[in-house]
Image (tube, rainbow, N blue to C red):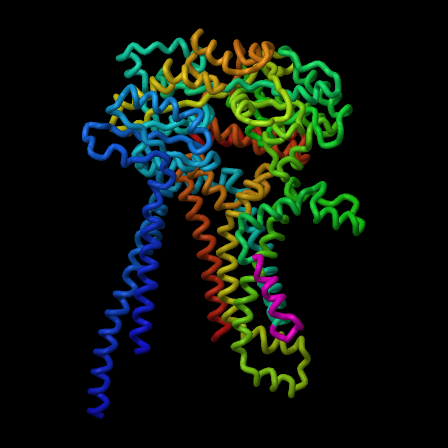
Amino acid sequence: MSKTNVKNKRSTAIVRRNRRKAYLFLLPNFIGFVVFTLIPVAMALFYSFTNYDGNRRMDFIRLTNFIKLFSDSSFVISLKNTIIYTVGTVPLIIILSLLVSVLMNNGVKGAPIYRAIMLFPHIASIVAVTVVWQFLYNAKNGPINQILRSIGVVDPPSWLSDQKTALLAVMIMIIWKGIGYYMITYLAGLRGIPKDQYEAATVDGANAWEKLIYVTIPNLRPVTFYATIMCIINSFQVFTPIYVMTKGGPGRATSVLVLKIYEDAFVNYKFGYASAEAMILFLLILVVTLIQFYHNKKLEA
Amino acid sequence: MKKKLLCLFMAAALALGLTACGGNGGNGGSDGDGGSSDANAGKDDQVTLRLALWDYEVDGPTTYEPIIKAFEDANPDIKIEVVSSPNADYETKLTTMLSGGDEVDLFFAKSNTALPGVQSKGFCMDLTPLFEENKYDLTPYGTVIEQQMTYDGDVYALPFRTNDWILFYNKKIFDDVKMEYPSNDMTWEQVGELAKEITAKTDDGIYGYSFSPKMGFIFPALAGTEDGFDITTSDLSCMTKALDWILDMQESGAMEEYAESVSMSKDQMYFMKGEWAMMWNGSWFVQNLNNQEDLGFEWGVAKSPYWEGTEKNGFVTSTPLCISASTKHPDEAYKFLTFMCGEEGAEILATTNLVPGYMNDEVLASYTSNLNLDESSIEALTNNVTYSFGEPNPVFSQIISAGQKEAELVLTGNETPEEFVKNFEAQRAELIENAE
């Protein structure tokens, strides 16, 4: 008894000393986080209740910004577009990358080559990729519409210049680009599923589909959880492809929240107002993430 | 041993992270500095003025450098440090610098339409007391000061250059189809007919007319559809005239479809490539064209077309130079402002094919003699009657931007000109209401 006590004491001392060291190691990163993330976020929260314009005296205007937001048609359109974009891309990216990774894992011939091909869009610079897709989407001579015409579509959509298809066009590109990254995440997850579970399923007479539904997907739940959260956050924060491809156009058809925040802050000098918009974006992400966490906990239990 | 290695590795990783952070932090202010600040080391009494502008790497040698150098020679106690950023990022960069407390003594506003936004936030110094104190004569600037630089009776900027919008044409294309060059008195309707004729007579790939395919270059034509137009207060239904004209041009094939031009990222380069017979653009384009070697064709300019039933006037923009309200050297900055935008600067600028905001007989003579253009073209560039978007106000640029977005929908076939009027009017009302 006393022997273990002494041992415990010594180990707690070691743990404490190590912990001190660990904190010391964490400190630089933590300082960076505080200075470049935490303080700005707190400031943004504060600004969102003011009419700060970058220079003149700022007044505390309470909730005026938040009230104005919902009578601002540009904001409402951007919010709607952001939600459509997220709902449209996230499930497809997750489902497709899961399917692709399962196929890769099941010994398709030349899997490494396919894997490289699938991953390539993720590695390529988003700006370059976007510019190339802009050419692909060209209404008259773009390859996509040429293919559509050759298979008999008489009046193919004019993609980026049509209000109705512009956002869809961006979404298609992002799904294509997003699959690679989540495929790799899933591949790592698939490696961690014990072989004996599949063997047991085979003994029980399960076919490939049943194995996917009852063995693979439940085992991948933590990966799916991570992938979905990351994907949703990325979708809510989409900016670059939209900025490069359409600048929110035609009209306001592809305007999204971050683009609107950027425009209000850096073009219109409405920092207070833009901060309020950022807070709405933050709330959106927070709520969705909390729901995810809650849901995941319930499944785990 | 293993642990030690791990420790080392982690320390290295952390150090890396730290330097990355440090790098980020430092970027805010000083990247993109065009000037060198080490030259004045050791001279304590020398004042350094920081001047913000765009595309110094491109336009510096021809446009800015000679004037800055002349100023520094005349005022050895003042040094100019240029803070440059790329054209497309300039306004964002300027916002960040001004509101972030970065010390900028003088800055160019992107154009007169961008000035109200900066001015209404209090970034520009009120120049009236300085002008009065120094008895500075503002008459050589003409009406532009009152129309574009004055707010509540006070002047907040001087125009460095003014840009009359004129019709550029490719003489070779006109010669090839044996047609007369555009004259200095044409309506848009006549230009349209001319463009259709040229398109019919030339090979594929040559268009009779084009705007530079960005809304900022097209939208001004819409504001000329009524005399005394003011984008904040006027009835917008007059704009349908211009939109109908553009749609007709697109349909007839005399002008490439806007959506097509945009998706091919076209710009004024296509005029230089000889694919557009006529193009409406600002007078700064004269400098671009004259700086081209081996253009492969002769070109001329005609006065801006006007809409039937309106006065013969053309769009005008200007490039305002402001003194930052927070400068620590107002006297030196004033000296530079009145040099750069004053007679001395204008004399130098006039030789570079840009139109100085400051105009007198000598400057004008110098400008025209350096153009290398035919007489009719020189006439097109001088004595113009002009219009703009109307009275500047704090939501001015937001209204213009909303109008551009809405007009884009018409040009891409998503909306009719009538819907444009309705939607733009609704958005304008919303912007004005939300600003109050």
Q: Where does the image place residue A72, in percent across and percent down from the top left?
A: 50, 38
Q: Residue at x 27, y 66 (%)?
A: A23
* Residue A90 visible in the shown view: no
Looking at this rendering, what residue extends furthest in the right direction? A152
Task: Please say whether residue A108 is one of the residues in the magenta stretch.
Answer: yes
Q: Where does the image place residue A29, in percent across and percent down from the top left?
A: 32, 60
Residue B318, compared with residue B56, is above or below; it is above
Q: Residue at x 53, y 11 (%)?
A: B382
Of A101 and B345, nearer the camera is B345
Q: Residue at x 47, y 30 (%)?
A: B433
Looking at this rendering, what residue extends furthest in the front direction? B294
Q: Residue at x 32, y 35 (%)?
A: B36
User: In the picture provided, is B222 more to the left or to the right than A240?
Assistant: right
Of B36 and B305, nearer the camera is B36
**Picture quadrant of residue B349:** top left
* Figure disc tally: 0
Residue B32, compared with residue B333, is above or below; it is below
Query: Over which residues does the magenta segment extend?
Result: A105-121
User: In the picture provided, is B340 more to the left or to the right than B279?
Assistant: left
Q: Where does the image place residue B61, in percent across and percent down from the top left?
A: 43, 28
Q: Where does the image place residue A114, in percent across and percent down from the top left?
A: 63, 66
Image quadrant for the N terminus of chain B? bottom left
Image quadrant for the C terminus of chain B? top left
* Residue B7 visible in the shown view: yes
Question: What is the chief secondary structure element of the magenta stretch?
Answer: helix
Residue B137, compared with residue A296, is above or below; it is above
Task: Please say whether residue A47 is one of the residues in the magenta stretch.
Answer: no
**Picture quadrant of residue B9:** bottom left
Looking at this rendering, what residue extends furthest in the top direction? B361
